[in-house]
Image (cartoon, helix red, strand yellow):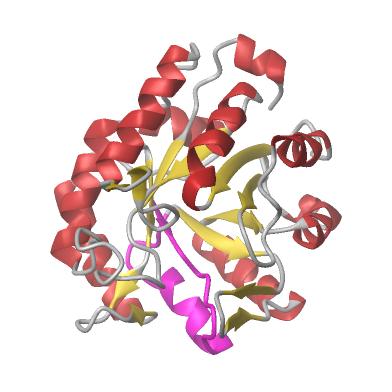
């Protein structure tokens, strides 16, 4: 993806991250947690322009769930509520045992995509995730066996190094997700995004996440650089300062900005073609 491809009006893929696995209704009363709430948000985001839904599962008490059974409940509800969106499961597991990290891959049918954290990271005061090379390899092996497209989660330069070193292991086009925020995530600044993109081989498709107030500027810059975007309440709770957002609000704004920048919003069919997905 390049600036020239932006000028050629390459479609932009919008991913909606609906709920996440850390903050809950104490942080945003409208955050979807139950399968029915997540399904309703999914349908609204599809209508607003999202072609990929990044899904987490929650237990009945709102805490994060890792079991394939709970992911199955969420996925079934989302499939029933939507028409043709790409379903992407999170295998991120801050503070979770490694054996649970495979569970989100084991629904029937398997998700078309899944996230793959590319190295260690710290989040908040007491949450950390090792993401050893052995775990990354085992998750990728299962994704390959089940026809699941990995989205490589690049939280910092070290993760970028890890990704670039093994790109040949991934089917074309490799899909990298560049994250910007606090902690061990890359510092959110326009020049840092430019530097990341310039380091990528031409064959790579990339997506951008900006946490909190960085969501809007970083995703907008991604569109100008020919990349794709992720928005949603997992990453950012606010539409503007002091005003809580809904998932569909954030998707609709991203779609409007894409159209204003003369980049058409990718349909699910176009997304599958761009990213080399197997189909729903």
The image quadrant that residue 52 belongs to is top left
Front one among 159 and 148: 159
Front one among 180 and 3: 180
Highlighted range, magenta: 86-111
Question: Vertically, is 66 above or below 141?
Answer: below
Q: Residue at x 78, y 31 (%)?
A: 202
Q: Position of residue 150 (x, y in %)?
A: 58, 56
Front one among 263 and 111: 263
Q: Position of residue 80 (x, y in %)?
A: 15, 52
Q: Position of residue 151 (x, y in %)?
A: 58, 53
Any part of residue 158 in sight: yes
Q: Is 174 included in the stretch rendered in magenta?
A: no
Q: Residue at x 36, y 22 (%)?
A: 256
183 vs 39, left or right, is right
Q: Residue at x 37, y 70 (%)?
A: 23
State the residue lying farthest toward the front.
Answer: 242
113 vs 47, left or right, is right
The image quadrant that residue 49 belongs to is top left
The image quadrant that residue 207 belongs to is top right
Q: Residue at x 38, y 26 (%)?
A: 255
Report the label total.
0
128 vs 245, left or right, is right
Any part of residue 267 in sight: no
Quarter in which the N terminus is drawn: top right
193 vs 280, left or right, is right
Q: Is 96 included in the stretch rendered in magenta?
A: yes
Q: Position of residue 107 (x, y in %)?
A: 35, 70
Question: Vertically, is 274 above or below 61?
Answer: above
């Amino acid at each position: 993806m390049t600036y020239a491809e932006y000028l050629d009006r390459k479609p932009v893929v919008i991913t909606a991250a609906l709920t996440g696995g850390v903050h809950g209704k104490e942080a945003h009363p409208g955050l979807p947690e139950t399968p029915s709430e997540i399904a309703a948000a999914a349908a609204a985001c599809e209508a607003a322009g999202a072609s990929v839904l990044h899904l987490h599962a929650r237990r009945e008490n709102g805490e994060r769930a890792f079991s394939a059974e709970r992911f199955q409940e969420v996925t079934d509800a989302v499939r029933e509520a939507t028409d043709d969106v790409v379903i992407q499961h999170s295998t991120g597991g801050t503070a979770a045992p490694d054996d649970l990290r495979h569970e989100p891959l084991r629904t029937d049918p398997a998700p078309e995509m899944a996230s793959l954290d590319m190295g260690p990271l710290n989040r908040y005061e007491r949450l950390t995730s090792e993401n050893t090379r052995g775990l990354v390899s085992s998750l990728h092996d299962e994704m390959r066996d089940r026809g699941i497209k990995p989205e490589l989660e690049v939280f910092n330069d070290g993760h970028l190094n890890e990704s670039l070193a093994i790109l040949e292991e991934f089917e074309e086009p490799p899909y990298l997700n560049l994250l910007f925020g606090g902690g061990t995530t890359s510092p959110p600044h326009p020049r840092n995004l430019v530097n990341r993109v310039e380091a990528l081989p031409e064959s790579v498709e990339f997506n951008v996440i900006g946490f909190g107030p960085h969501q809007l500027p970083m995703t907008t810059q991604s569109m100008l650089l020919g990349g794709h975007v992720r928005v949603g309440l997992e990453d950012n709770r606010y539409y503007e300062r002091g005003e809580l957002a809904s998932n569909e609000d954030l998707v609709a704004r991203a779609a409007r900005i894409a159209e204003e920048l003369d980049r058409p919003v990718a349909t699910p069919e176009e997304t599958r073609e761009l990213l080399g997905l197997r189909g729903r």
